[in-house]
Amino acid sequence: MKKAYRIKKDDEFQRVFKKGKSFANRQFVVYIFKREDLAHFRIGLSVSKKIGNAVVRNRIKRCIRQTFHELNEQIDSGYDYIIIARKPAANMDFHEIKKSLMHVLKLSRVLKQPQKK
């Protein structure tokens, strides 16, 4: 995922936390903040040390990034997303993580239905 698609700075995280809306299920919390000046979406990831060691945390982050990469066409652009992983995410494989993230994104109404060919 390109650097333009990531949120790294603390003040950007804080803006999304303060002004954005949150949606959650058991595995993930997603904060969403509308940006008028952005042509694409950006994501920020937060995986606590309580979830597991560095290997586990990095695997979860890779799975989340890959999910957003695969759902690129379906996700509303012009938003900042912050995804916070919860403990149950440590025991999930990629397909379970993708399904759970899609569930939260549908709750927040930012996931469009795929176009039928």
Image (tube, grey):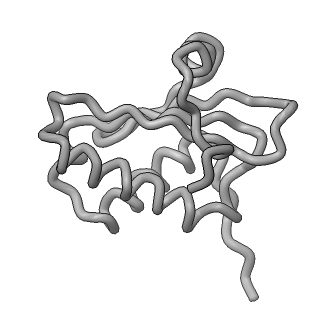
Residue 77, percent from left and from top: 75, 47
Q: On screen, 57 above or below 18?
A: below
In this rendered view, identify the residue nearer to me: 83 or 49: 49
The residue shown at (56%, 50%) is 106
Q: Where is residue 47, by image quadrant?
A: top left
Residue 107, percent from left and from top: 54, 43
Q: On screen, 34 above or below 2?
A: above
The residue shown at (61%, 45%) is 3
| Quadrant including the N terminus | bottom right
Residue 72, percent from left and from top: 65, 61
In this rendered view, identify the residue nearer to me: 94 or 7: 7
Q: Residue furthest right?
A: 37
| Quadrant including the C terminus | bottom right
In this rendered view, identify the residue nearer to me: 113 or 90: 90
In this rendered view, identify the residue nearer to me: 71 or 8: 8
Q: Residue furthest bottom?
A: 117
